[in-house]
Amino acid sequence: MTSDIVQRLLDGDRRALTRVVTWVENGYPQGRDALRELFSHSGNAHIVGITGSTGSGKSTLVAAIAREYRRRDRSVGIIAVDPTSPFSHGALLGDRIRMQDLTSDPGVFIRSMATRGALGGLAAATNDVVTVLDASGEDVILVETVGAGQDEVEIADTAHTTVVISIPGAGDDMQAIKAGILEIADILVVNKADLPLAEAVYKQLHIFMELDRSEGWRVPILKTVATKGQGVTELVEEIDKHREYLKRSGRLAEMRRHRARRQLLAAAQGLLLEAVLSTAEANGALDKLVESVSRLEVDPRTAAEQLIKAAKG
Amino acid sequence: MTQERKLKIIIAKPGLDGHDRGAKVVARALRDAGFEVVYTGIRQTPEMIAETALQEDADVIGLSILSGAHLELFPRVVEELKKRGMDDVVLFAGGIIPREDIPQLEKAGFKAIFGPGSSTHDIINWVRENLPKQGAAARS
C-alpha cells in the first residue's frame, strides 16, 4: 500500500516532495514511513558530491554543472549543506544565491540543509534526503558539502562521483601530500583557473596524482572558471565517464553493497541505543552511571556495560 | 537527545533595488536567534520567492524592499504562494514602506511590517510569537 503523499511524490508533485524531505530531515515518524515506501524506487540517480574549502566556488560550480545537465535534458536535484552555529544552533543557508536562475526551472529542485552538529561535512539526514530525491526521479543529484578542510570526507560515502575543488594560493605542496580530502577525489578541479598561481596548483596536483598507485580509474585534473562556465562541459563529461566506469568495472554494485552494510549497521546501532536509553533513562540507571563516571568511580567502558545490562534486566 | 522542531525562514528581496544590507542584518540576527535562515539574494521575482519557499518548505518568509514597488510585488508573492499550495506560510516584511500602505499589505496577508528604526530584537520576538503552531514538519 502506497500512502497518498508518497504516490503524489512519485507522480512528480513537488509539494509532496518538499514535505517528505522536511519530515525526513527532522526525523519524524512520517518520514520513516515514507522512506520505507520510497526506498525501492531509489537507485537510479547518479549522485555527485562537490567538496572543497570555504570560498573555493562550490555553489557557483554546482550551479554551472546543473545548467550543463539541464542543457542535456537531465533533471537535477541539489542538496546544499551549510554549517549550523555551535553557539546559537541557528544557520544561515546562503548557497542558493549562486543558483538563482535555476530556481524557476521545473527540472531542478534545490534544498538547503544545515549540518545540525554533524561533523563530516554533511548533515545526519543528508543520505536519507538523497534517497528521497533519487526516488522522486531526479537523474542527477548534486550534493554540496560545507566548506571542507582536511577531514570532512563523509561525502565520499554518499556520492558515486566525488569532485574535489582546489583553488590557487591555498597552501603549498605539503598540503597536497597529507591524508584527507584529495584522496577521496574521483575528479580534481582547479577552480578560479583564471587567477595567477592556478598553473602552480594544477602542476602540484599532477605531481600528487602521479604518486597515486591505485588501479582502475585515473583521476582527471580539470581547470574551471565556474563564474564564466569555463571548463564545465568537460567536467560534466568526466562525471559521466566516471559513472560509466563504475558500471562497467562492477564498482557501482560493490559500492551499493558497501553502503547497504554501512547503512544497515548505522540503523541497527541507532535502534539499539534508542532501546537501551529508553529503559536506562526511565529507571534512572543512566543518571546514576553518569554520576559514577564523573566521580571517577568507574570508567566509561565498564559503565556502558553496566548500562546495557541494566537496560536488559 | 530531544527532537527539536527547527523552523525555516526565508529572507528574500523582491524587485530591482540592490541594497541588501538590511536583509542581511535581519538574516544574521535570526540565525543568532537559533533559526535556520535561507537568504535568496537580491532581485527576486515573486515566482522565484514562492518557488524557493516551496523547495525549502519554509515556515516563514520575510521580504525586504526599498524600491517602493511593495504594493505591486507583495500581493503577487502571496498569489504565487497560493498557486503552489503554500498559503500557510507566515509573511512579514521590512524596508521603506509608507505607513498608509500598511493596511493594504496586511489585507493581502502580511502579518507585520517593520520600518526603518526597527530593532532586530523586535523582529526576533515577533517571529517567536507568530510562528506557525506546528511548523512545516507536522503539516501534511
Image (spheres, coloured by chain):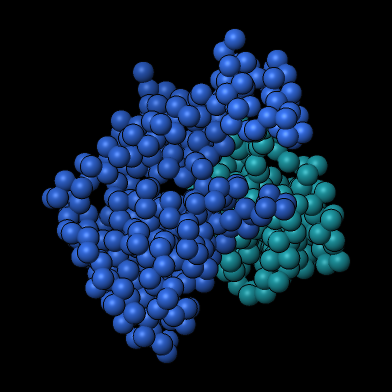
**Front-most of residues A191 and B22:** A191
Height in image: B19 above or below B100? below
Query: In blue, which chain?
Result: A
**Front-most of residues A80 and B116:** A80
Horizontal side of A189 relative to B46 (left or right) equals left
Question: Residue extending furthest top?
Answer: A313
**Front-most of residues A291 and A46:** A291
> Where does residue A4 sit, x and y in percent of width and height?
43, 25
Name the residue at 69% across, 45% down: B90
The answer to whether any part of residue A37 appears in the image is: yes
Horizontal side of B116 relative to A271 (left or right) equals right
> Where does residue A211 sit, x and y in percent of width and height?
26, 71
Where residue B123 sits, quadrant-wise, is: bottom right
Horizontal side of A308 relative to B126 (left or right) equals left
Which quadrant is home to the C terminus of chain B?
Answer: top right
Name the residue at 35% across, 51% down: A159
**Front-most of residues B93 and A46:** A46
Name the residue at 34% across, 55% down: A48
> Where does residue A101 sit, x and y in percent of width and height?
45, 65
Height in image: A195 above or below A135? below
> Where does residue A287 sit, x and y in percent of width and height?
73, 25
Which quadrant is home to the N terminus of chain B?
Answer: top right
Colour that chain B carries in the picture? cyan
The answer to whether any part of residue A230 appears in the image is: no
Horizontal side of B66 relative to A11 (left or right) equals right
Height in image: A88 above or below B39? above
Question: Residue extending furthest left?
Answer: A248
Where residue B113 sits, quadrant-wise, is: bottom right
Where residue A261 sits, quadrant-wise, is: top left
